[in-house]
Amino acid sequence: MTAIAELAMPISPGLIVILGGLLVPFLTAGIARVYVLLLSAATLVYVLGLPSGEHAAFTFMDLDLQLLRVDKLSTIFGTIFLIALFLGNLYAWHERDRMQRTAAQIYAGSAIAAAYVGDLVSLFVFWELTAIASVFLIWAAGTDRSFRAGMRYLIIQVGSGVILLAGVLFHVHETGSITFGHIGLGSIGGTLILLAFGIKCAFPLLHNWLQDSYPEATVTGTVILSAFTTKLAVYALARSYAGTEMLIWIGATMTAFPIFYAVIENDLRRVLAYSLNNQLGFMVVGVGIGTELALNGTAAHAFSHILYKALLFMSIGAVLFRTGTCKGSELGGLYKTMPWTTGFCIVGAASISAFPLFSGFISKSMILSAAGEEGHFITWAILLFASAGVFHHSGIKVPFFAFFAHDSGRRPKEAPWNMLLAMAVTAGLCIGIGIWPEPLYAMLPFPVDYVPYTAVHVITQLQLLLFAALAFTFLMRTGLYPPELRSTNLDIDWIYRRALPAIIRGLGSGIGVVWDSLIGGGRMLVSATIDGAARNFGPYGLIGRTVRVGNGVAWVATLLLVTLLIAYSAG
């Protein structure tokens, strides 16, 4: 009976997706397309039926591991991860690359599994597996740029895992527990674990792996990448560092500084990568505030963000798929032949800008309200500025320069049917959640006593968006808005990609000169020594040459006489 009960015990939905993904290489392309859709849909149904509580616990090498902990926080992240995987698989229906399809399932499954674990050791395993599986979505682009970006991405992501492992070891030594729960700061282990989470969450100065790698991935790979890595880090922060005040300022900084880079960036997928960083900042602020309203806002915003960010990457990915470029300077006028993609991009833009009746409004306003209620007025003002900024670069700039600006003369076909269907479903969810947020609110970690559609919230947001639109129009009409030009924007990664290698090469050259001088001087010294030895000890040298016996006896007699005289004098 015990064995039967163990067999009936729930298993991690992430493991279902991972093991299911391993079968993809053995299927034909046609069967694999249907299979991965059914796999993600069936796992979603399974997740919604999981009983709350702690399951799948076992002991391994004296460690108490737990692969399945079901509560509202893990369920909402597991649910949106599976929805994103389903939509990503539908968007990639046309893709025949088995490696990408397999990597996507393993990557998503690892993130889902990490959201359900109850111990830090299991978290580390799946944390690293997300890094290893996801890099193949970057390398699949097959370019030299994607290979180099993938290598940098892998180093940083695996490095995050190594720091996480070091933090876990210190934490276990300090507390004797590997439970994945609230950790907080105040210890070496807690600090290292926060640093590991911060790398994956793209904290300021640790963020450039995101803008470096995501735009180099394949069209479909970028959509998948946008959903999991950073949101897994947000989940980990919410689980372990809720109420850590330092995160408020880190998050506020994250919301503000990417705006300036996004405004001057020409590559529209890189613009969206900067705006992704911006939106993560709202979630980090919510974690830092740590109240029930703030944490509900973080979870709701993560849910909404995965959808509208995927929709934006889908629309720009469709443009890239049809035109071969996503640079604003080379696009424009595409609405004429890609009207559906244009409409879906506008829905994504409205959602990320938090227009009323779109998903971003009902989640972002919760975090703003929490900041105001707790007296974080400077943070609230920064978030308000960031809200206007994201409308500038993602709400207006992306659809405007891709579809409406100058006529580029391009007349590409509309996106393939599967891309359009994936965008349609995602757009429907963005609008549906914005109009009817109650089902999402019911999934949040804490009871929700919040009404987004009040006169104050709606009027304030509309005023903000209106003035942001006026500012954009004024800058465009006066020619003050930064033009879309072929350019390379310098960010913090310039230090380790250009400055440090140049410094190291310079030091290497200096060391080489000193080394060559030392070697040259040493050779000259050795050569002089050998020449001197040859002169004195060689066959014809003063000491080495052969002398007559008589001369030798005379020398010996002379030395003996000197010795006797010295001995006599001493006596």
Image: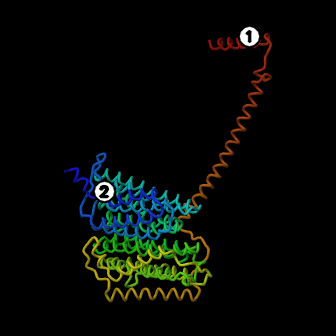
Number of callouts: 2
Label 2 with label 1: CB-CB less than 8 Å? no
| Residue that badge 1 annotates | 557
Q: Earlier in the sequence, mark 2 or mark 1?
A: 2
Other-residue count near label 2 (Cα within 10 Å), few / some / many at <14 / 14–19 / ≥20: many
Q: Choose between 230 and 565: the one closer to the eye.
A: 230
Q: Which mark identifies residue 205?
A: none
Q: Which mark identifies residue 67?
A: 2
* Residue 107 can be seen, yes or no: yes
Q: Position of residue 341 (x, y in %)?
A: 50, 79
* 360 to 38, vertically: above or below: below
Residue occupying the point 35% across, 79% down: 368
- Relative side of 123 to 551, left or right: left
* Residue 261 can be seen, yes or no: no
Other-residue count near label 1 (Cα within 10 Å), few / some / many at <14 / 14–19 / ≥20: few
* 250 to 384, vertically: above or below: above
- What kind of residue is marked 1? Ala
Q: Quadrant of the C terminus?
A: top right
- What kind of residue is marked 2? Leu
- Relative side of 267 to 72, left or right: right
Residue 380, quarter of picture: bottom left
Q: Position of residue 566 (x, y in %)?
A: 67, 14
Residue occupying the point 42% across, 61% down: 105
User: Can you name the residue that lies furthest to the left here?
Assistant: 1
Q: Position of residue 328 (x, y in %)?
A: 57, 77
Q: Position of residue 549 (x, y in %)?
A: 78, 10
Q: Choose between 395 and 326: the one closer to the eye.
A: 326
**What element does badge 1 sit on?**
helix
Q: Choose between 437 and 270: the one closer to the eye.
A: 437
